[in-house]
């Protein structure tokens, strides 16, 4: 059996290598709300995140002040992932000597990408929109970002801190724009010397290889019934016309309105618009729909680049409580000061091999969809 003091020499080096990989790969966790992860946790534990209620200003009338009704979102620590690898005795001695196995980096990259991708795939409640579905943004100008910025402002997202996350194709276009490349426009030389956009036009811009593509439904020729719908409702009935589907996460517009809506998880979308049905959506209907069939137009399949304010999401990554109560393993945990993710390394001796297993426990919730907008690509 490997001696504890021998493992004590190898584990910190492997853990440090893992933290370096987290810094390189986990982009989104750096920029979203991390204020709810102070104490140890266990899988299945929950965290309540308060969401303030809106307050309307009113003329002062004694004894008529109404109470506030804040809501909350629950983050469940239900994501527990591990990435493991084995080394033989010679490789373990090299680790003790400072030669870190490449498998350590690869194992933690897998975990980091898992966290990052989960954040990016929780886009199904984002209804704000800029850009054109199926067209990579920033080919000629920044109109797509300006549209998304306008959506954030109209949705009352706080002005700071804001970020833009985009895939490599969108970044390649953006870096070719004079607004980001020319020092006389951007105010520094980072675009030329480092190929970095950084903070411009009220947001910090970065590229993420894990940006996802939303595969939209196929609805064409859809429309509401002629019953009419009042402003503030969150469900509309569809006329039996057109063809195709509307899926949860699809963004759509209603004729005569500038607001974009998203078919949200309170319903199931519509499996066949040609047969009619209902669609549940967010935000509430902005403008009354009159007693006439009114067109519903879907945003087609698109890359989900996102402009957002940090409080759109809340992420909690916590160290484990009461790990290894029997004392049969060797554990060490550390919090990466850059990404804020908590990583644990467990070491076990197996048949003439030593098993190294990195794991991470975290929970995620999109709590303020109004603080984000898609930049379709």
Image (spheres, rainbow, N blue to C red):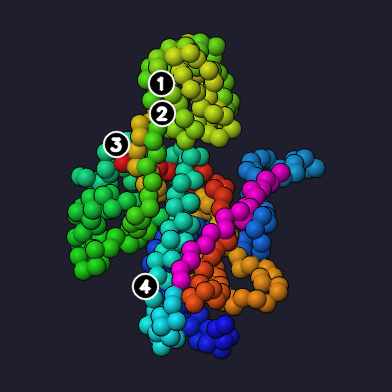
Q: Which residues are magenta?
A: 69-86
Image quadrant in which the N terminus is located: bottom right
Q: Secondary structure at mark 4?
A: helix
Image point (45%, 81%), residue name? 89
Task: Name the N-terminal-most of marks 2 and 3.
Answer: 3
Position in image of residue 320 (x %, y %): 63, 67
Image point (53%, 59%), residue name? 81
Q: Are marks 1 and 2 in contact (CB under 8 Å)?
A: yes
Task: Name the N-terminal-most of marks 1 and 2.
Answer: 2
Q: Which numbered dot is residue 32?
A: none
Q: CA distance from mark 1 to mark 2?
A: 7 Å
Q: Which residue is denoted by mark 3 in the rendering? A: 134
Position in image of residue 370 (x %, y %): 51, 43
Q: Are marks 1 and 3 in contact (CB under 8 Å)?
A: no
**Crowding at label 3, few (<14), some or many (≥20) Cα neighbours within 10 Å?**
some
Q: From the viewer's perspective, is 101 left or right of 248?
A: left
Image point (41%, 88%), residue name? 97
Q: Are marks 4 and 2 in contact (CB under 8 Å)?
A: no
Position in image of residue 49 (x %, y %): 64, 53
Q: Which numbered dot is residue 102?
A: 4
Q: Secondary structure at mark 1?
A: loop
């Amino acid at each position: 059996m490997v001696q504890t003091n021998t493992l004590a020499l190898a584990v910190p080096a492997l853990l440090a290598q893992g933290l370096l990989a987290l810094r390189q790969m986990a982009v989104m966790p750096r920029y979203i709300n991390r204020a709810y992860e102070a104490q140890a946790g266990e899988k299945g534990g929950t965290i309540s995140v308060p969401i303030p209620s809106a307050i309307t200003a009113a003329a002062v009338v004694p004894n008529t002040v109404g109470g506030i009704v804040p809501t909350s979102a629950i983050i469940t620590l239900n994501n527990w992932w591990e990435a493991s690898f084995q080394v033989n005795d010679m490789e373990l001695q090299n680790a003790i000597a400072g030669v870190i196995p490449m498998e350590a980096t690869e194992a933690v990259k897998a975990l980091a990408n898992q966290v990052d991708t989960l954040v990016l795939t929780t886009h199904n409640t984002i209804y704000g929109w800029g850009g054109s579905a199926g067209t990579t943004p920033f080919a000629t100008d920044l109109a797509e970002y300006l549209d998304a910025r306008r959506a954030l402002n109209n949705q009352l997202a706080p002005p700071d801190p804001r970020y833009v996350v985009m895939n490599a194709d969108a970044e390649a276009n953006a870096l070719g724009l004079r607004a980001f490349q020319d020092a006389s426009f951007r105010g520094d030389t980072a675009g030329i010397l480092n190929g970095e956009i950084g903070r411009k036009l009220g947001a910090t811009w970065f590229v993420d290889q894990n940006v996802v593509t939303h595969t939209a439904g196929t609805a064409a020729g859809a429309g509401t019934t002629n019953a009419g719908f009042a402003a503030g409702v969150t469900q509309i009935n569809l006329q039996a016309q057109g063809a195709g589907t509307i899926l949860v996460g699809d963004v759509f517009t209603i004729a005569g309105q500038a607001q974009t809506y998203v078919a949200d998880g309170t319903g199931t979308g519509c499996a066949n618009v040609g047969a009619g049905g209902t669609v549940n959506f967010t935000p509430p209907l902005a403008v009354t729909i009159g007693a006439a069939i009114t067109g519903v137009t879907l945003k087609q399949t698109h890359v989900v680049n996102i402009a957002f304010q940090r409080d759109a999401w809340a992420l909690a990554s916590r160290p484990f409580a009461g790990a290894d109560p029997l004392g049969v393993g060797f554990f060490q945990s550390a919090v990466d000061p850059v990404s804020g993710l908590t990583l644990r390394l467990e070491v076990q001796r197996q048949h003439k091999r030593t098993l190294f297993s990195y794991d991470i426990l975290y929970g995620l919730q999109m709590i303020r969809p109004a603080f984000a907008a898609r930049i379709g690509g």
